[in-house]
Image: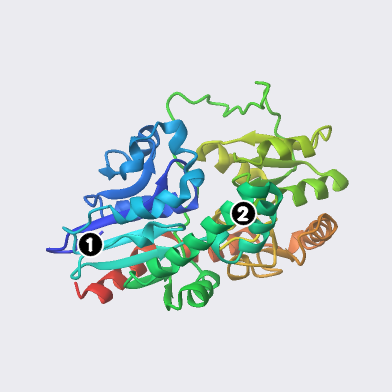
């Protein structure tokens, strides 16, 4: 990657506790600027070393908490703005933040240029605030206190956005939300998506066996549909489970999250639905390679797993909302379903199978290459040059 002469650069990220789409983007930024330190609210040392090597990582005062407490960071949300504001970035000329929560609120020196790559405006403070508040209303006094906290955080978040010099959005969908909630324009640069073909670790089983929750070997069906996702309520995996309980087709779900227990209970007794938990990239690649199609039941700001599946030539069935509308072209690389309802999703599966012979794996893979890492690095570096007159 080209250097930025005479410029000191820092990277900022919300939390480094798990590896998701935002962390994949940060890792590519780290490849662009390997000498730049990474500042974050809290991090897990083992996680950092596994995915970011010997990167210099600096946490806030919340890093002093035990790891088991740090992982429950949503419970001390009211402290996070203060923690972010106490990060000292005064020595840097350029700060590049990777933000889906509060790290855009860093305070920089007058001569520092702050560019924020925004994965999303904070969801639970803005477009999802009313469903979130409805859940809180069931918790009595605790719910009332939480609503007051949300109000305070919303005020802070809007003020924090004003500190950003330039916004970059990961999709047109996110750009429009930045404009609505923060009253700021944002350059759209799609996130980097690479084909998952890492080398198999030397100590991995050659057969790439996968085990279920009881330690039994999971037999991969010859034909199956696939979900690769964090298992969280907003991902709407339950809709897909209900649909496949009726369809009877094999469905494999890869991922972890706080909704996993509930989802497994929902699928209990249906042997066509398998949960594989978290899997390393070389295992996920095998499942992408051999699946019938990827199922994407929730609304996302972009949806990196859709592009990952397409790099293996696989079509996608997705809800017609959010970033999916910028990735999926109906009839070319998959199909949409219109409403988040099991019967509507099931009908989408039917249409996808009817049109299956029309999809060309080569065309699908070529389409997905527009989201390459090289394209992302080139566009982001050119934008930094433009903003900072490098």
In the image, 232 versus 85, the foreground residue is 85
- Residue 120 seen in render: no
Instruction: Choose mark 2 or mark 1, whichever is in front.
Output: 2
Q: How many marks?
A: 2
What label sits on residue 2 in the rendered view? 1
Identify residue for label 2: 144
- Residue 290 seen in render: yes
Picture coordinates of residue 22, whole percent (x, y): 46, 53
Q: Mark 2 Cα within 10 Å, few/some/many (few <14, many 20+)?
A: some
Residue at 19% across, 61% down? 3
Picture coordinates of residue 255, whole percent (x, y): 60, 41
Compared with 199, 79 (above or below) is below
Picture coordinates of residue 11, whole percent (x, y): 30, 55
In the image, 2 versus 319, the foreground residue is 319
Could you tell me which secondary element the residue under label 2 belongs to? helix
**CA distance separating discs 2 and 1:** 51 Å
Could you tell me which secondary element the residue under label 1 belongs to? loop
Left or right relative to 202: residue 264? right
Q: Mark 1 Cα within 10 Å, few/some/many (few <14, many 20+)?
A: few
Outermost residue on the left side: it is: 6
Classify the position of the N terminus by image quarter. Answer: bottom left
Classify the position of the C terminus by image quarter. Answer: bottom left
Outermost residue on the front side: it is: 141
Picture coordinates of residue 367, whole percent (x, y): 55, 66
Q: Are marks 2 and 1 in contact (CB under 8 Å)?
A: no
Mark sitting earlier along the chain (2/1): 1
């Amino acid at each position: 990657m080209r250097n930025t002469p005479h410029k000191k650069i820092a990277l900022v990220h919300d939390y480094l506790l798990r590896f998701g789409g935002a962390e994949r983007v940060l890792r590519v930024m780290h490849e662009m600027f390997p000498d730049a330190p990474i500042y974050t609210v809290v991090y897990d040392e083992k996680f950092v070393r596994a995915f970011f090597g010997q990167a210099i990582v600096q946490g806030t005062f919340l890093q002093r908490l035990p790891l088991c407490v740090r992982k429950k960071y949503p419970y001390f949300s009211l402290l996070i703005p203060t923690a972010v504001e106490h990060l000292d970035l005064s020595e840097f000329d350029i700060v590049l933040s990777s933000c889906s929560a509060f790290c855009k609120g860093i305070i920089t020196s007058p001569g520092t240029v702050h560019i924020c790559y925004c994965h999303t405006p904070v969801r639970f403070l803005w477009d999802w605030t009313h469903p979130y508040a409805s859940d809180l209303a069931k918790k009595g006094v605790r719910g009332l206190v939480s609503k007051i906290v949300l109000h305070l955080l919303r005020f802070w978040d809007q003020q924090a956005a004003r500190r950003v010099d330039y916004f970059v959005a990961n999709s047109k969908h996110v750009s429009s939300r930045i404009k609505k909630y923060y009253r700021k324009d944002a350059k759209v640069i799609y996130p980097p998506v690479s084909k998952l073909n890492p080398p198999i670790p030397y100590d991995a089983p050659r057969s790439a066996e996968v085990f279920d929750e009881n330690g039994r070997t999971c037999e991969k069906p010859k034909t199956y549909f696939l979900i690769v996702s964090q298992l969280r309520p907003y991902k709407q995996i339950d809709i897909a489970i209900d649909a496949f309980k009726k369809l009877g087709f094999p469905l494999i779900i890869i991922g972890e999250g706080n909704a996993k227990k509930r989802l497994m209970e929902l699928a209990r007794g249906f042997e066509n639905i398998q949960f594989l938990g978290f899997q390393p990239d070389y295992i996920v690649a095998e499942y992408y390679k051999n699946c019938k199609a990827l199922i994407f039941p929730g609304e996302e700001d972009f949806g990196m797993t859709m592009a990952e599946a397409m790099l293996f030539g696989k079509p996608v069935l997705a809800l017609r909302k959010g970033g999916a509308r910028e990735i999926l072209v109906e009839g070319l690389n998959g199909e949409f379903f219109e409403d988040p309802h099991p019967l509507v999703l099931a009908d989408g599966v039917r249409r996808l199978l009817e049109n299956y012979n029309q999809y060309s794996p080569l065309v699908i893979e070529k389409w997905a290459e527009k989201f390459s890492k090289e394209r992302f690095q080139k566009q982001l570096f050119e934008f930094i040059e433009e903003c900072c007159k490098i």
